[in-house]
Image (tube, rainbow, N blue to C red):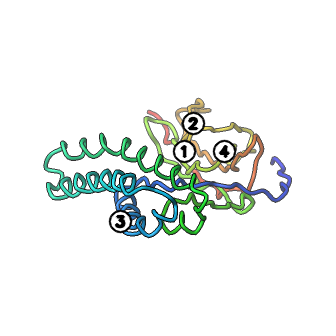
Amino acid sequence: MLNHKADIMSQITITKDFVEKSEEGFELKSNNFSGKINLYAETLGISPEQVAAVLDALKTLSDIREDKIAKRMASKAATINYKTNRKPTEKIVRDFKKLVEASPNCTPEMLEDLGMNNTVKIIDTDTKAPDLHVKMVAGVPHITYEKTPFEGIRLYGRINGGPYDFQCVVAHPYFDDTRERRDATQAELREYYAYFMKNGKEVGLRSKGIKITLEALD
């Protein structure tokens, strides 16, 4: 059995972009922004024309989305139209944020009220453990886990209750155990556990063990 020493308390800081990825989230933030930007525009020294430009872009995108919803996905055209317009609209919003932040009167409270502030989340890595899942895919054990925000996992394995003499670093959110069977005519039990990896080191807690039986081949 391999020993694992406790790591020094560590944290990960995650910055969430103020532009929401989901359509619903983007629409909610757009409505919030549209209803409040005129409260701050004069204070920020932003012209009515500049405000109108970003509001028009948001309105156009919202109308496209409403059209897509109304058609209930009967046609892919509305979805393609939305996706085509999403990135340029995001650029307009991001550029407008720079305009807001460039004002000497801009405050963090204004950015928060407009929904234009990036949020920061702190994760205590010492309390996190991989949630492993395994199933047979194409004749081999297929292991999956949620990778973000870590670099991957160090996976440990054993066969038929023996020592955990197999280990590897997994950078993808999945791993296929393609090792040859010891005896294809006999059923084989494979067991696994893992630790998250960050900055090339194991962090957090050991995962719960998982196991799967490879049935004997005729």
Q: Where on the picture, by quarter, is residue 36? A: bottom left
The tag on residue 31 is: 3
Q: Are marks 1 and 2 in contact (CB under 8 Å)?
A: yes
- Going from N to C along the chain, the mark reached first, 4 or 1, is 1
Residue type, numbered disc 1: Ile
Residue that numbered label 2 is attached to: 177
Label 4 Cα crowd, 10 Å radius (few <14 / some 14-19 / many 20+) = many
Crowding at label 3, few (<14), some or many (≥20) Cα neighbours within 10 Å?
Answer: some
The first of marks 2 and 4 along the sequence is 4
In 3D space, how far apart are the residues under numbered discs 3 and 1 (Cα atoms)?
Answer: 42 Å
Dot 2 or dot 3, earlier in sequence: 3
**Horizontal and vertical percent position of residue 128:** 68, 59
**Residue 103: x, y in percent?**
57, 56
Mark 2 → mark 3, Cα distance in angstroms: 49 Å
- The amino acid at mark 2 is Asp
Mark 1 element type? strand
Q: Nearer the viewer, mark 2 or mark 4?
A: 4
Say if mark 3 contacts mark 1, CB within 8 Å.
no
Which secondary structure, mark 3?
helix
- In this view, the residue in front, 108 or 47, is 47
The residue to which callout 1 is attached is 143
Per the image, the residue denoted by label 4 is: 153
Q: Amino acid at mark 3?
A: Asn
Q: Name the amino acid, label 4.
A: Ile
Looking at the image, residue 190 sits to the left or right of residue 200; the answer is: left
Separation of residues labelled 1 and 2 (CA atoms) = 8 Å
